[in-house]
Image (tube, coloured by chain):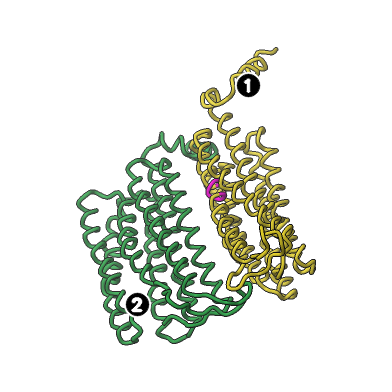
Chain colours: A green, B yellow
């Protein structure tokens, strides 16, 4: 439930969190765009999706930020007082769901794309992951917008079912494909799944917080929680996908690696190779 | 503490400083983006991070500038009068912290990236510098937003601990890696650390100024101090990183140097080589 009143400190905590997400997503997208030539052409689709995800998130956070500023206003001098819900302006949480509906399936496509599997295996994984992730978001929505604890609980449980299916695909089905990956990235890709699990885990916790009736503080921490989860699940995740793509590019094309790798690294690798 | 009233002169000093930072950061970012092909591919990640840092700073200064203009208003004709804190609008200093949280770790990554060390050494330095710099910023925040001198002092001291650790890494640990750098850039890289020290040194001074109770003037000089420090620590620093990357590119690839170097320089180098 949206609080009627936020203290100046609560207000600036939400305000600064939302702005942090804009900066993090926007500049991760720009970084990945500029860094596209640092991976082989075959990995550029994965990085393109990663930067598109961050771009979509930046767009939605611009909207959420503006919506928050319109919804809570104060008459205090220097803004140093309580903020109350304004007349005629809603804080629109729907932006988050619209964002997830687009970005969550893309995050899974990004992961499968960087694996660069054989076409049949890739399609099989995508046909399992993409519909399940869309279902997970759609089923969460009625609960998120409801004020009724019963409705929230039912849709919370319903949307957990496709989430568990996604976990099964990631940790059972996808594990079989891990063996085909170069050893240097196998650990990173495996840990990426835990990053998804960890960052997605914030969503249900943030979802449940208002049900616990912790008042305005609960709502503030829900906003902060969503913000951190979105940075980890999209920007940090995208940077790790980029590192995986870079490592694989270097392994698969030594002349490309030669150009991209530091001089010191080349010397150190040669020394290691020469050692008896 | 934020002053209730600024004279027209104080107001325009802050106003012009903030605008100067926007111009400096935005166009340094654009300069570095255009100049990417002037360094070898292996140095482009360092320059990309340098331009992202300036871009993030430009974004936050646009926000700070707008926030300042909304917070202080005047009814004087032609704006030639005192400016007072407006109703319902806060000057949000939080943007600075959100900015540093993203840019300060990246400034250290930028320095390590341009060294182009062997992977193991690079990772070791980053694992020390990045967490310490995040801790330094996070610990400074409660002091910055507090009006209480005691709280400001405690968090000021706490955030100095990771700062001292960063200095130790930069001046002791990193010095060992300096020997692997070409002689032509060794001095510049060494001096870069002093630039960081000098520009970061402005932050604690600006942090302490309000505690000294120097009134509106103290607050105005704090804004000017932060502005200059941000230009030096990000834009000037980024340009120097670019110079280091360019010099190293020329040394490591003579045919690339041939293309990039001025004709006069080529002649002068040839003459020197020919001398007995």
Q: Main secondary structure of the magenta part?
A: helix
Whether marks 2 and 1 lie on the same chain: no
- Image point (42%, 64%), residue name: A63
* Left-right relation of B177 to A255: right
Q: Are marks 2 and 1 in contact (CB under 8 Å)?
A: no
- Between circles 2 and 1, the one closer to the viewer is 2
Q: Position of residue B187 (x, y in %)?
A: 70, 38
Label 2: which secondary element: helix
- Residue B164 visible in rendering: no
Q: Position of residue B140 (x, y in %)?
A: 66, 66
Q: Nearer the viewer, residue A65 or B166?
A: A65
- Residue B265 visible in rendering: yes
Q: Nearer the viewer, residue A159 or A271?
A: A159
Q: Name the mark on residue B265.
A: 1
Label 1: which secondary element: helix
Q: Name the mark on residue B55.
A: none
Q: Residue A43 magenta-drawn?
A: no
Q: Residue B53 magenta-drawn?
A: yes
Residue A99, by quadrant, is bottom left
Residue B160, by quadrant, is bottom right
Chain ID for label 1?
B
Q: Nearer the viewer, residue A275 or A65?
A: A65
Q: On the rendered image, what quadrant is the N terminus of chain A found in?
A: bottom left
Q: Of all residues shown, which one is farthest toward the front? A: B77
Residue density around tag 2, few if under 14, some if 14–19, many if 20 or more, within 10 Å: many
Residue B60, by quadrant, is bottom right
* Left-right relation of A264 to A106: right
Does residue B77 sit above or below B123 in this rendering? below
Chain ID for label 2?
A
Cα distance in 3D space between marks 2 and 1: 67 Å
Q: Which residues are magenta?
A: B50-54
Q: Which residue is mark 2?
A: A144
């Amino acid at each position: 439930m949206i609080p009627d009143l936020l203290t100046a400190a609560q207000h600036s905590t939400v305000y600064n969190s939302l702005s942090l997400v804009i900066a993090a997503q926007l500049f991760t997208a720009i970084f990945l765009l500029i860094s596209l030539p640092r991976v082989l052409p075959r990995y550029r689709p994965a990085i393109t999706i990663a930067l598109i995800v961050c771009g979509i998130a930046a767009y939605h956070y611009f909207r959420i930020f503006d919506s928050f500023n319109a919804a809570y206003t104060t008459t205090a001098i220097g803004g140093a007082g309580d903020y109350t819900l304004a007349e005629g302006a809603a804080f629109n949480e729907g932006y988050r769901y619209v964002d997830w509906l687009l970005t969550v399936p893309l995050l899974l496509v990004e992961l499968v794309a960087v694996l660069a599997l054989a076409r049949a295996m890739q399609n099989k994984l995508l046909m399992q992951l993409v519909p399940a992730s869309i279902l997970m978001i759609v089923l969460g929505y009625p609960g998120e917008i409801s004020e009724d604890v019963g409705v929230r609980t039912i849709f919370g449980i319903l949307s957990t079912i496709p989430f568990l299916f996604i976990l099964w695909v990631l940790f059972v089905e996808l594990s079989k494909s891990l063996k085909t990956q170069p050893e240097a990235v196998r650990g990173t890709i495996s840990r990426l799944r835990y990053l998804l699990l960890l960052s997605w885990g914030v969503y249900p916790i943030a979802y449940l917080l208002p049900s616990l009736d912790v008042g305005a503080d609960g709502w503030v921490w829900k906003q902060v929680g969503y913000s951190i989860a979105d940075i980890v699940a999209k920007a940090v995740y995208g940077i790790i996908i980029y590192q995986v793509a870079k490592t694989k590019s270097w392994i698969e094309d030594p002349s490309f690696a030669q150009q991209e790798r530091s001089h010191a690294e080349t010397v150190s690798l040669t020394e290691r190779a020469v050692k008896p």
